[in-house]
Amino acid sequence: MRRQQLVGILVALALVAAVAAIVITKSCCGPSPAPAARTAVTGLIGSEKADFFASPQVRRAFGKLGLEVSVQHAGSWQMKDQLKGSDYDFAIPASSVAADSIPTPITTTKVRPFYSPLVVLTTPEVAEFMRQNGLAAKKDDNVWVMDMQAYWAAASAGTAWTALPHQEDRPAGLSGQIYIATTDPRTSSSASLYLALMSYLGNGQKVVASQNDIDRIGPVLQRLMSAQGAMLSSSDQLFRDFVAGTERPLSWTYESEVAEQALAGTLPAGTAVIYPDYDIQSDHTVVELTPKAARVSAALANDPDLVKLEAQFGFRPENDPGLLATDLRQKGNQQFPADLRSLGTSQPPPPTSDLLQQLVNRAVPADQ
C-alpha cells in the first residue's frame, strides 16, 4: 500500500508540475506570435520597371517591410487616363513631367527614388563613323559621348548618312536619313523627353515657354518624327528590336534597360552606348494616390536591400548613384560612367507638362 500510495503521489505531483509549467509559459510568454499581416498596395508603372517589380528578390524585400506590392504596366502619358476611376495606390511614370500631369487626391511631396539618363544605342562601327564626322567622341575611359548640337543640325536639315564625309568608312547598310529612333511620344515618356531635348536645341538652347516657341519649332519636330516611320509604344520593345538587329542604326532608350542586360551578361557584344552631351534625365517619380503609397515611396528611397536591387536592375539610386557603375565595372563593363557629372553633360529642364503635351501633338498629329 505504501508503494502504491507513493506512486500515486508522484503521478499527482507530475501532473501538477505539468499544469503549472503550461500556466507559467502562457502567463510569461503569451501565445506564439502570428505572422505579421502584409499591407497590399497596387501601382501603375512603366514597362522599363517591369523586371524590377516582378523580381522575387524585390518582392521579398517588400515583404520584409510588411508590403505586398502588385503592379500593372502603362505608358507614362497613358497613366493619367488609366488612373481615372481606378483604385491604384500609386503610379511611377518615367519622368517628373509625366508625374506632374497626374492629379492626386492627397497632398504629398513626390519622391524620386532612382533615375536613369537617356542614351543612344548603336554599333561600334556606326559610332566610329559618327566620330569621324564630328557627331560623337570617345572619352579616355571608353565612354562614348554624342554631340547633340551636331546631330540636331544634321537631322533637322534632313541630311543622309551617304552625304557625310569619309564614305569609305561608312558601315555597310548605313543609309537613309540621319535620325534617332524613338518610341511613340503620345504614350512613352522616353520619346517625349527626346522631343523636349530637341525643342530645347532647336529653340536656341532655351526651354520652350510659349505658343510662339511651339509654332516655330513644331514643324521641324514633325519632320524628325515622321522620318522614323512607324513607332513602337514602349522602350522595352524598341530595345528588343535593337538587340534583334532591325534597321534602326540609332535608338533612344533608358540607360537602365541597357545596364540591366549588361549586368545579366545578355547585352550583345556589338553594342555601343552613347551618352548625349545634352540630356534630359528620366526621373522615375512616385505619385502617391492613397496614404498607403507613402510606405512604398519610403521603401524604394531608403531600404538598403531595395536600393541595391535598383542598381542591379540598371537604375541609379538617388541615395547611391555610383552603385550602378560599381556593379557594372566589377563585371568588366567599362562603357558606363561611374559619375554622370564627369561627362560634362548639360541637363536642361523640360517644358511644363502642358507645353510638352502640345509639342507632342504638333510633332505627331493625331492622324499620323
Image (cartoon, rainbow, N blue to C red):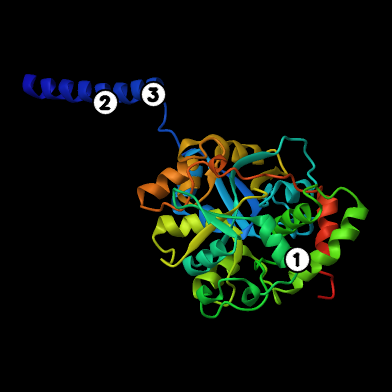
Q: Is residue 190 visible?
A: no
> Mark on residue 123?
none
Q: Is residue 25 visible?
A: yes
- Amino acid type at mark 2: Ala
**How many C-alpha atoms fall within 10 Å of the one at disc 1: few (<14), some, or many (≥20)?**
some
Furthest-right residue in this view: 212
Residue under circle 2?
18
* Real-space CA distance between mark 3 and mark 1, rounded to the nearest whole angstrom: 75 Å
**How many C-alpha atoms fall within 10 Å of the one at disc 2: few (<14), some, or many (≥20)?**
few
Locate the C terminus and report the quarter of the image it occupies. Answer: bottom right
Q: Nearer the viewer, mark 3 or mark 1?
A: 1
> Mark on residue 156?
1
Q: Where is 232 relative to 194, above or below?
A: below
Furthest-bottom residue in this view: 173
Of the image marks 3 and 1, the number of the one nearer the N terminus: 3
Of the image marks 2 and 3, the number of the one nearer the N terminus: 2
Q: Nearer the viewer, mark 2 or mark 3?
A: 3
* Real-space CA distance between mark 2 and mark 3, rounded to the nearest whole angstrom: 16 Å
